[in-house]
Amino acid sequence: MNKEESYALIIAFIIAITIFIGSSIVFPSLQGIGGLNLKSTTYHFSIYFFLCAFFLLALSPKGNLSNNVLVVVLSFLYAASDEIHQLFTPGRSFSYWDIFVDLFGILLAALLYSIFRLWQKQKA
């Protein structure tokens, strides 16, 4: 693992810790149109997009498909475990919607990363 990959891994772990701490805090309910909270949805999408992106940079520097799939699965499992953690946090609750939004962020990060790596290979 080179220096850049090590930095990416450190950033990914910082993001994971931030997610855990954030899911331990009770936030005021800010439901928007149709019961959706745009702020929460944006947070979930963004934080898991970057979690997956930095894990990909660290663990799949060449864009290896099996490594990409592993990172997506691990990121998704972390998202699911975060929601389960919220079941045991007073004032928080489990949400399938949050997991769906997390997964969308994860998959978009993986797709963009794969496209970028493919483009780099074709360019070389």
Image (cartoon, rainbow, N blue to C red):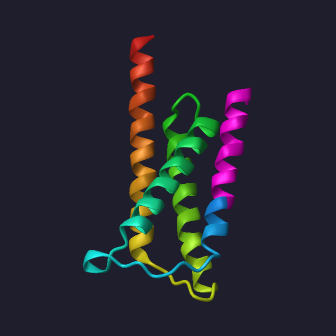
User: Farthest top residue?
Assistant: 124
In the displayed structure, would residue 33 be above or below residue 111?
A: below
In the displayed structure, would residue 119 be above or below residue 91?
A: above
Question: In the shown orientation, is residue 26 left or right of residue 111?
Answer: right
Question: In the shown orientation, is residue 19 left or right of residue 37?
Answer: right
User: Can you see residue 96?
Assistant: yes
Residue 119 inside the magenta-drawn segment: no
**Position in image of residue 43 (x %, y %):** 47, 61
Quadrant where the image shows the N terminus: top right
**Position in image of residue 94 (x %, y %):** 50, 81
- Give the magenta-colored segment's residue range: 1-17
Which image quadrant for residue 61?
Answer: top right
Which image quadrant for residue 113?
Answer: top left
**Position in image of residue 85 (x %, y %):** 62, 77
Magenta stretch: helix, strand or loop mostly: helix
Question: In the shown orientation, is residue 46 left or right of residue 57?
Answer: left
User: Farthest left residue?
Assistant: 34
What residue is drawn where x is 41% and y is 76%?
96
User: Can you see residue 2?
Assistant: no
Quadrant where the image shows the C terminus: top left
Q: How many numbered marks, from 0 up?
A: 0
In the displayed structure, would residue 24 be above or below residue 19?
A: below
**Position in image of residue 52 (x %, y %):** 53, 48
Which image quadrant for residue 9?
Answer: top right
